């Protein structure tokens, strides 16, 4: 069975991807420093004989060994988290990525970078195809993440071009589902927490800005295909769900599913907040034969059920 290193395995997507790979019988080595991930996400797999875990900061050291695949998910991902860890975010996306690329080079592993739709910034092209170069403010508050990921992509392509490391880059668009930290600060956990604790739901701007949300099981399937399909070295592929929703519509749906009274607080839009975000997934359909399958209402219901248990009310 293949041996894979998953960096960021204690995070939201890492927890799901680890479970998926363990279920396939793969030997999974997880590494995480718990900066935004949680020890309990690792504990759930401790008893699995094909799982090993190292608590390490990948900017300092990486678990040496032979790997067929290396997946790098390690990075704070939500604006709340990366704005509170600005320098760490830049370091994990530069030195951390370099350390993993060196390991891929040594061991001949295929390397998958989890990049982000944030490399498109506040996009002037809609929806965003992979060959759109983006509209990023290099000195704005969000640049620690956006430019960090742009650097991560650039160094990944440098190892591909100059050292022939087999690499693939996933540009992940908003993903949601169980195990996303309720305190993560992103829209769905925020709405869930506020609705469950009887608070008004906070909407930035007038709520007409759009997002498109991909359920995490669809994302994991896309990442797995990008990691393992033949002939994809050097490819950059958008993964996300093109089903576009306004923030206000999402808030209304959360209220409806939980059956709570509709109550919203409107606050000013944060600086550089993108107004529209929607992936063009033509390339993923062509190369991976992949597209999301879980409808938003269904995924949202499952996710809200999970938050109900975690937040432990009613
Ligand atoms: N969830 C999304 O909607 C989304 C969207 C776009 C991109 N992404 C990307 O996908 C990846 C995973 O996102 P997520 O939502 O699971 O985030 P997450 O914060 O839940 O997981 C990231 C994990 O990386 C770990 N980590 C951070 N710095 C580290 C370091 N120096 N050494 C070791 N581990 C470290 C954290 O502790 C955490 O467990 C990230 O790279 C993120 O940028 C996610």
Image: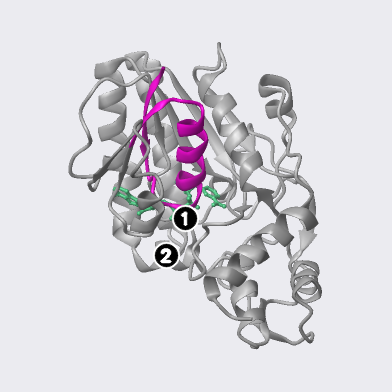
**Label 2: how many residues lie within 10 Å, few (<14), some (14-19) or many (20+)?**
some
Q: Is residue 43 above or below residue 182?
A: above
Residue segment shown in magenta: 1-29
Which residue position holds label 2?
81
Specify whether 304 is left or right of 164.
right
> Which quadrant of the view contains residue 294?
top right
> Which quadrant of the view contains residue 267?
bottom right
Which residue position holds label 1?
77
In the image, is the residue at mark 1 within 8 Å of ligand 1 by its beta carbon?
Answer: yes
Which of the pair 22/58 is nearer the observer? Answer: 22
Secondary element at tag 1? loop
Q: Residue at x 69, y 76 (%)?
A: 205
Q: Position of residue 271 (x, y in %)?
A: 55, 70
**Label 1: how many residues lie within 10 Å, few (<14), some (14-19) or many (20+)?**
some
Secondary element at tag 2? helix
Q: Position of residue 129 (x, y in %)?
A: 69, 36
> Do the numbered discs 2 and 1 sit on residues whose CB atoms are within 8 Å?
yes
Q: Is residue 123 visible?
A: yes
Location of the N terminus by quadrant is top left
CA–CA distance in space, label 2 to label 1: 7 Å
In the image, is the residue at mark 2 within 8 Å of ligand 1 by its beta carbon?
Answer: yes
């Amino acid at each position: 069975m293949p041996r894979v290193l998953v960096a960021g395995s204690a995070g939201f997507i890492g927890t799901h991807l680890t479970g998926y790979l363990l279920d396939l019988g793969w030997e999974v080595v997880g590494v995480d420093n718990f900066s935004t991930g949680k020890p309990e996400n690792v504990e759930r797999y401790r008893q699995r004989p094909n799982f090993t875990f190292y608590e390490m900061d990948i900017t300092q050291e990486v678990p040496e060994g032979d790997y067929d695949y290396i997946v790098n998910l390690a990075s704070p991902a939500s604006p709340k988290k990366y704005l509170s860890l600005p320098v760490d975010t830049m370091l994990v996306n530069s030195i951390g990525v370099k350390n993993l690329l060196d390991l891929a080079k040594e061991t001949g592993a295929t390397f998958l970078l989890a990049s982000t739709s944030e490399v498109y910034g506040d996009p002037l092209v809609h929806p965003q195809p992979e060959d759109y170069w983006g509209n990023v403010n290099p000195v704005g508050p969000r640049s620690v993440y956006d430019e960090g990921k742009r650097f991560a992509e650039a160094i990944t392509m440098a190892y591909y071009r100059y050292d022939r490391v087999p690499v693939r880059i996933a540009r992940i668009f908003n993903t949601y589902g169980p195990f996303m930290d309720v305190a993560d600060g992103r829209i769905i956990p925020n709405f869930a927490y506020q609705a469950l604790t009887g608070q008004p739901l906070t909407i930035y701007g007038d709520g007409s800005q759009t997002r498109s949300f991909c359920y995490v099981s669809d994302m994991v399937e896309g990442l797995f295909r990008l990691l393992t399909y033949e002939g994809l070295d050097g490819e950059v592929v958008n993964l996300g769900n093109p089903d576009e929703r306004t923030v206000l519509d999402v808030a209304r749906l959360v209220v409806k599913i939980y059956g709570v009274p509709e109550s919203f607080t409107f606050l000013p839009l944060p600086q550089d907040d993108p107004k529209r975000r929607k992936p063009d997934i033509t390339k993923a359909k062509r190369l991976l034969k992949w597209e999301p399958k879980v409808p938003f209402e269904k995924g949202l219901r499952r996710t809200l059920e999970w938050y109900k248990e975690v937040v432990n009310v009613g």
